[in-house]
Image (spheres, rainbow, N blue to C red):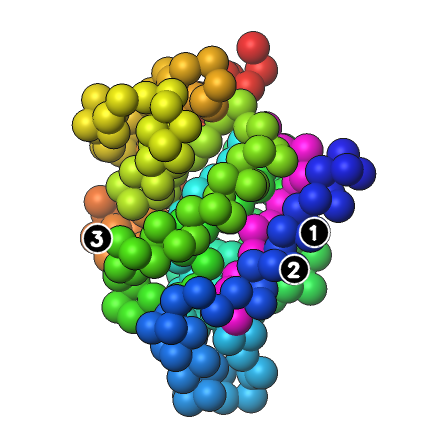
Amino acid sequence: MAKKSALLGTLNEEIVVCRKCPRLVEYREEVAREKRRAFRDWTYWGKPVPGFGDPSAELLILGLAPAAHGGNRTGRVFTGDRSGDFLYAALYKAGFANQPTSVRRDDGLQLQNAYVAATIRCAPPANKPLPSEISSCRSYLVREMEILQPRAVLALGKIAWDAYLEVLKQRGLILSRAAFPFAHGAEAELPSEGARLFGVYHPSQQNTQTGRVTSAMYGQVLGRIQRFLAK
């Protein structure tokens, strides 16, 4: 565990100083300067947001990107926004987190057997990263996977689902992503070198406030993951 923790620490130090994508750098720093009125007293993070969680995790949870006034403000993935409120409450109920809330980096949140990362490490305009930006960030995901060696991956939405499958495709482990269609509750048994892939709708307000996804729906999938990891 100490070795994995050190390797993840080194990786996260590299992520935080990344400036590969000019559009994302400009946007994340502009948001950090202008701020949202409700957070005018905050010093925004305004940098790429590293992964977070248990270095010995068997479950890798992969999201889309930091929210402009969530992770881009707090410096921790899924922290300080409604998506994070929903996600960490679900992880707490399932036993993967020590508390149901995630408001700031020093709030005491700890993950148990889970590690959370994002497909894109910088907040993108309108929450829509470009394909080139996803590609530029892929090496960070590859290294996280190499370090963690997760047994299960939970993709929060189709972009994260495709991002994980693309890593396997580039390794030559699968021929096409099309063989593994995304859906809420989807489960893909991949080659032995790949983890079991589970999919859920992203916990965005657009999904949670309309009832497209509920805490019970997340609970069902997380329960399946627990049973898989217990084997």
Question: 10 Å neighbourhood of mark 1: few (<14), some, or many (≥20)?
Answer: some
Quarter of the image for residue 12 reads: bottom right
Q: Nearer the viewer, mark 2 or mark 3?
A: 2
Magenta highlight range = 47-58
Q: Which mark is residue 104?
A: none
On the rendered structure, is 178 left or right of 74? left
On the rendered structure, is 133 left or right of 56? left
Q: Secondary structure at mark 1?
A: helix
Q: Secondary structure at mark 3?
A: loop
**Residue designated by label 2:** 13
- Quadrant for the C terminus in the image: top right
User: Of the residues under marks 2 and 3, which one precedes in the sequence?
Assistant: 2
What residue do we see at 69% from left, 64% from top? 106
Residue 92 located within the stretch drawn in magenta: no
Looking at the picture, which amino acid does disc 1 mark?
A: Gly
Residue 78 locus on image (x, y percent): 48, 57
Q: Is residue 90 above or below residue 150?
A: below
Residue 112 locus on image (x, y percent): 65, 37
- Residue extending furthest top? 231
**CB under 8 Å between discs 1 and 2:** yes
Looking at the picture, which amino acid does disc 2 mark?
A: Glu
Q: Main secondary structure of the magenta part?
A: loop
How far apart, in angstroms, are the residues tagged by discs 3 and 1?
38 Å
Q: Nearer the viewer, residue 220 or 149?
A: 149
How far apart, in angstroms, are the residues tagged by discs 1 and 2?
6 Å
**Residue designated by label 1:** 9
Looking at the picture, which amino acid does disc 3 mark?
A: Thr
Q: Secondary structure at mark 2?
A: helix
**Residue designated by label 3:** 210
